[in-house]
Amino acid sequence: MECHFCGGEMKKGKTTYTLNRSGYHLLIDDVPAWVCMQCNEAYFEENAVDTIQFMIKNLDKQINKVREAAIA
């Protein structure tokens, strides 16, 4: 597999998924991914992406509940 950014070799490994949203920041360590040996760009496996998106959706709901409780 070749990196779309630099053309470097991709190898299976693990990396950190980072998300910065208004009101919170999320870091998930040791996420399985294809990682470029040259530029360190990461491509996540489909099942990891699905799980992360599920987590973010639920986290957004919980954050909104916290914000609504603070206003009340």
Image (spheres, helix red, strand yellow):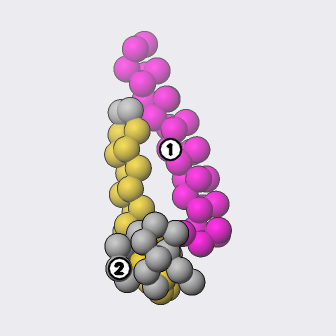
Identify the residue under disc 1: 59
Q: Which residues are magenta?
A: 43-72
Residue drawn at (53%, 48%), measured in percent from left and top?
56
Q: Give the distance between the C-alpha atoms of the residues marked 2 and 1, in whole angstroms.
A: 33 Å
Question: Which residue is at a point 64% across and 68% down the rendered structure image?
Answer: 46
- Residue 32 visible in the displayed image: no
Q: Is residue 3 above or below residue 69?
A: below
The vertical placement of 51 against 12, above or below, is above
Q: Position of residue 11 (x, y in %)?
A: 47, 86
Against 54, is 61 above or below?
A: above
Which residue lies at the image location 46% right of the left edge and 21% below the top edge?
A: 68
Side of 61 where 24 appears, left or right? left
Residue 30 in percent (x, y) is at: 40, 74
Type of amino acid at the residue the image marks with label 1? Leu
Please provide percent x and percent y for residue 3: 49, 74
Verify whether residue 45 appears in magenta. yes
Earlier sequence position, callout 2 versus callout 1: 2
Total number of numbered discs in the rendering: 2
Instruction: Give the residue type that dot 2 points to.
Output: Gln
Using the image, tell me which numbered label, if any, was put on residue 38.
2
Question: For the residue labelled by badge 2, is the local secondary structure a helix, a strand or a loop?
Answer: loop
Which of the 4 image quarters holds residue 29? bottom left
Residue 52: image location, x then y, percent: 55, 58
Task: Tell whether 16 sits left or right of 58.
Answer: left
Neighbourhood count class around disc 2 (C-alpha, 10 Å): few under 14, some 14–19, many 20 upward? few
